[in-house]
Amino acid sequence: MSSVSLPAGIEPSGPRPRHVTATRIGIYAFLLIAALFFLIPLIVMIMTSMKSMSEIRGGNIFALPMQPTLDYWVKAWSSACTGRDCYGLAPGFFNSVKITVLSVPVSIVIAMINGYALSFWRFRGSELMFAILLFGAFVPFQVLVYPIIFGLSRVGLFGTLPGIVIVHTIFGMPILTLLFRNFFASLPVELFKAARVDGAGFWRIFFSVMLPMSVPITIVAVILQVTGIWNDFIFGLVFAGRENMPMTVQLNNIVRTSTGTVEYSTNMAATVLTGAVPLIVYFVSGKWFVRGIAAGAVKG
Amino acid sequence: MSTSVEIKDLSLNYGTVTVLDRLNLEVGKGEFIVLLGPSGCGKSTLLNCIAGLLDISAGQIFISGKNVTWDEPKDRGIGMVFQSYALYPQMTVEKNMSFGLRVAGMPKPEVDARVKRAAEILQLESLLQRKPVELSGGQRQRVAIGRALVRDVDVFLFDEPLSNLDAKLRNDLRVEIKRLHHRLKNTMIYVTHDQIEAMTLADRIAIMKNGVIQQLADPHTIYNKPTNLFVAGFIGSPSMNFIRGDLTGGALNIDGASIPLANYEFKAPMNGAAVLGVRPEHVVVGEEAQKMPFQVESEIEIVEPMGADTIAWTKLGGQSLTFRADAEVRLVPGQKVLIGFDPGRGSVFNGESGERI
């Protein structure tokens, strides 16, 4: 850059003038195109959901709806058929809410205590415990489906709400414990020592000192768990039972139920509705979400 | 003076690594002991053992006559101040200081009275409602001291409390700690790697290396009569000159010179390889050198003006020698000067074992 020759009479002074360079334009153009590319499916889905079936059959998928209508959204929500029943997605939505609202706090509280104990209260074999927990993160969960069905049905929890909550708690445990352990490990150990000299015990240190400091990482954990549990399909299908089928399973049923023509508009509306919760979570908490991914990745 | 802290045959091993090796230490009541040593010498580990924050492998710890070897930190009658302050970030200064008392379930009026007293001593009254992030480093460390103060303990443990502060603040707070000790007269055990802190604060200094106390003595003895080469080289800046030679017939023979050691008080006379240690400030130059038992002509190599004085580098019998001269004495590299010192003020070490002889 030093080879730029200045016009006579101009002495460099103060902030360097900023120029729009070709590199900059290129970067923004690329980012814009990439953003559009990833937005296309969503846009097409939303547009299609507002079109009538005849318009879909006749037209181009990128064309704007000629007579936009929300009828299919209403139908998807309240009267689309999921197998034999025709109550739409609404029951599934409330089932998903129930499952998420119960599983998220339970799994996070347990993981938080795990992480706290593993980073500060080193006991004989605590490293091994942690290694086993971590190993759990790499076991394909399909392998465990049958044993868990067997176990849960023995205690009478198979196909119940507590059953699915337990399953989500178990499968969230490795990654959440890792998240919290790494967070607590990043805190100065002297803080823990000071609290011990002050006479605080396991729970007192946890509630008075550690918990107030864990708000950021807890937000991250909530985001991870809400999106993870909401998007889950297989556990809901297998363990939740007929009464508690989550939204994702209901969505699948709507899309698969084919009596006569496939009603794309309804399917699209139902899909967007199901994806809305994680989508909103991402939009609202983008910064925290990225931080969570980074927190899980660095430091072992 | 009765004993406040007594450590008997304390060992700590991590697997096969020995951090502390059968260590014995007795600290008198009201005494200010400094544990000094390079990083990794086990001084902080020893402090953590005394506090009960580390499980020891062998030995016993007594505090105020009570065997506390298996006691929880809170039951040992100690207060501890950490290098990183370790203040609870979500609590105000007041809550930070009172946390230990609240955990113990002390009645509120008593808690308030103690916090008030500590805040007065440490001049923290106006900061009581602030959070730690709103405090400067020096204030934070004062709060950390206050947290130990309110607990009304017999023994204060300091783990490098000033190492995170800048130079000026460190000097100020050092004086404050000294003042605090004069006022409270508690037993204090203070870990540092800073020899100035050790020399200025301590009643006695314990110099540690590889988990073993090398010398335990008052600062004057440590400085003037170091027990081995490690202690001699560790204390003092610029460090002590070591002149290697051959000890025969009460004189140290080096390349081209013989240093008479007639007025040196030998513990046990010997012949053979020896090292003479001479403090840079004990070497004089010019007219004063003529009065010294040992004099030699030498050439100045490098001069470092420090303001208050000047450090000059020269050679003696082919070995490097530094000396401290008055800032008014003009010294330039290449200059030939007469230097001299009194070998009797130095320290002689066995050339093989490094022990003082």
Image (spheres, coloured by chain):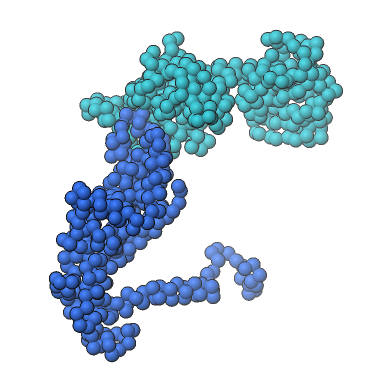
Apparent side of residue B20 relative to residue A111 in the rendered image (left or right) = right
Find chain A in the image and tell me its colour.
blue
Residue for point 36% across, 26% down: B73
Provide residue A32's location: percent of width, then percent of height.
Answer: 43, 74
The answer to whether residue B180 is seen in the rendering is: no
| Residue lying furthest bottom | A58
- Residue A265 lies left or right of residue B243; in this view the side is left
Picture quadrant of residue B248: top right
- Letter of the chain in cyan: B
Give the percent coordinates (x, y) of residue B195: 57, 27
Q: In the orientation shown, which residue stands out farthest toward the right?
A: B256
Look at 49% across and 30% down and name the residue there: B14
Q: Residue at x 70, y 31 (%)?
A: B311
Compared to B73, does A65 lie above or below? below
Q: Position of residue B87 (x, y in %)?
A: 37, 37
Which percent across, then down, holds residue A80?
A: 17, 74
Vertical position of residue A100 compared to residue B9: above or below: below
The one nearer the camera, B105 or A181, is A181
* Left or right, B131 with reference to B109: right
Q: Is residue A228 left or right of residue A7?
A: left
Instruction: Name the quadrant containing residue A288.
Output: bottom left
Count how many numbered circles sit on residues in the image.
Answer: 0
User: Does residue B27 sit above or below B131 in this rendering?
Assistant: above
Q: Residue at x 41, y 25 (%)?
A: B51
Of the pair A253 and B227, the residue shown nearer to us: A253
Asked if one can make out residue B83 in the rendered structure from this viewpoint, the answer is: yes
